Image (cartoon, rainbow, N blue to C red):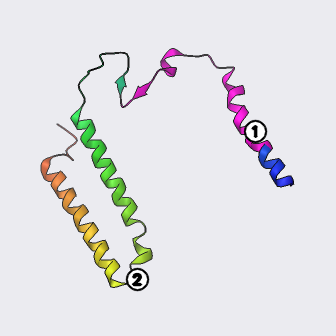
Amino acid sequence: MIFYLCFTFLCLILFILPFIINLNLKWNFNKASLFECGFDSFLMTRSPFSLRFFKLCLIFIYFDIEIILILPSPLFLHFNSMFFWVFFTIILIILLGLFFEWHQGSLNWFY
């Protein structure tokens, strides 16, 4: 019972504390305005989108998924040889994608 009371009290404190701290700060229009992907929301609505930025985002997602697939690999590689070949195929596809991006020039940071 005391655990639930302490938990509820802690949750209330953590919920109310930011509002109390925020009362002392000045409200700034620039900090409160929307900011998304480096675009100023008050300029033209049809501003050109940077394809280089989009390509870098896709590469980041690609390597993020690669890490998600590689990290648990030591746990299941010793179970069965099928897991090894599936893992080897995934790594091969990822490496082929890396070489394709490298050949295409997507990994070149200096244009």
Q: Identify the amino acid type marked 2.
A: His
Q: Mark 1 near mark 2, Cβ–Cβ under 8 Å?
A: no
- For the point 22% across and 41% down, the residue is 109
The kind of secondary structure element at disc 1 is: helix
**What residue is pinned by disc 1?**
12
Tell me: residue 54, above or below residue 3.
above
15 or 23: nearer the eye?
15
Q: Position of residue 98 (x, y in %)?
A: 22, 57
Q: Is residue 59 left or right of residue 11?
A: left
Q: Which dot marks residue 78?
A: 2
Q: Residues within 10 Å of mark 2 (few under 14, many from 20)?
A: few
Q: Identify the amino acid type marked 1.
A: Leu
Residue 80 included in the magenta stretch of the image: no
Tell me: residue 108, above or below residue 19.
below
Q: Position of residue 102 (x, y in %)?
A: 17, 52
Image mark count: 2
Q: Position of residue 9 (x, y in %)?
A: 80, 42
Q: Position of residue 20 (x, y in %)?
A: 72, 26
Q: Classify the position of the N terminus by image quarter.
A: bottom right
The kind of secondary structure element at disc 2 is: loop
- For the point 17% across and 36% down, the residue is 111
92 or 109: nearer the eye?
92
- For the point 54% across and 16% down, the residue is 28
Magenta part of the chain: 9-37
Q: Which dot marks residue 2?
A: none
- For the point 37% across and 66% down, the residue is 70
Rendering quarter of residue 87: bottom left
Q: Residues within 10 Å of mark 1 (few under 14, many from 20)?
A: few
Nearest to viewer (mark 1 / mark 2): 1
Q: Residue most toward the left? A: 103
Residue 11 included in the magenta stretch of the image: yes
